[in-house]
Image: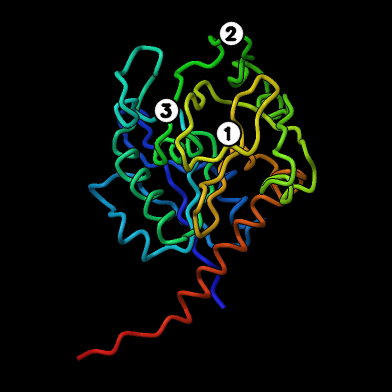
Amino acid sequence: MARARVGIITNQVVRDDYRAHSGGVMCVQAVAEVSDCLPLLIPADPRYVGVEELLDSFDGFLLTGGRPNVHPEEYGEDATEAHGTFDRARDSVTLPLVRACVERGQPFLGICRGFQEVAVAMGSTLHPEIRDLPGRMNHRMPPDGTIEEKFALRHKVTFAEGGVFHKLMGAPEVMTNTLHGQGVSCAGKRFHIDGTAPDGTPEAAYVDGARGFSLSVQWHPEYNAAQDPVSRPLFAAFGDAARSWAEGRASAPMLKSA
């Protein structure tokens, strides 16, 4: 049987005036080797892809991290210099895609910016620079060092007792990396925060009432996913959800032509 198909959301990058849709090897590797699904890159631009055709073409979606942030107009605020750069094309694809997946029960996994996309899609607001808030730590990626140093484990995430993440991880708290500047400010009613950093920053969440897999994390579990005891169960569970969706699609009755 063919592997379940996971669409990996890409980011637009420009190098020497050459525009490209880029997807990280870490994400591809995690989907292929840990989720055991077929990884396929999606150009996140509504000029080239439509939400309905994406829903019909894939069994699950990986909402990746990325440097551009969700535009604050998407949650009713004005853009400032602190909000950084934006990718309105990606916003136009991922936000309605998340809402559609929630309603259909189609699985998705949000990572970093993807976590924030799910938050905004579910009515949350974001703070542009959480390290400026009283009592908050600096969650940003270290500016220097090796890739191992940048993705090193840096703080604990504590899960709600008996919650979704607690059950999935088999532990009430875990160690994670941290490479983000923004964070959830006010959570929407359906964006259920299930794990937080020591400074109170939301780090793990799911969509309340969603019929399918809807987990998102603020850290980057794609790094060392096959060996990391936190990343592996997350990607494995996501793969199981994508396979379940694929099996349901395969068993659905074919429409007969008139």
Q: In the image, what residue occupies the spot 50% across and 49% down?
A: 62
Label 3 Cα neighbours within 10 Å, binned few <14 / some 14-19 / many ≥20: many
Q: In the image, what residue occupies the spot 29% across and 38% down?
A: 89
Task: Give the residue at mark 3.
Answer: 125
Task: Give the residue at mark 1.
Answer: 218
Q: In the image, what residue occupies the spot 52% across and 48% down?
A: 208
Q: Quadrant of residue 139?
A: top right
In the current view of this chain or complex, which residue is farthest to the left? Answer: 258
Q: Identify the colour scheme used.
A: rainbow
Task: Give the residue at mark 2.
Answer: 134
Residue 69: % across, % down: 41, 28
Q: Quadrant of residue 143?
A: top right
Numbered disc 1: secondary structure? loop
Label 1 Cα neighbours within 10 Å, binned few <14 / some 14-19 / many ≥20: many
Residue 194: % across, % down: 63, 39
Please tell me which residue lies in front, 20 or 112.
112
Which quadrant holds the N terminus? bottom right
Tags 3 and 1 touching, CB below 8 Å: no
User: Is residue 7 shown left or right of residue 173?
Assistant: left
Between discs 2 and 1, the one toward the N terminus: 2
Cα–Cα span, label 3 and label 1: 15 Å
Tags 2 and 1 touching, CB below 8 Å: no
Between discs 3 and 1, the one toward the N terminus: 3
Numbered disc 2: secondary structure? loop
Please tell me which residue lies in front, 50 or 97.
97
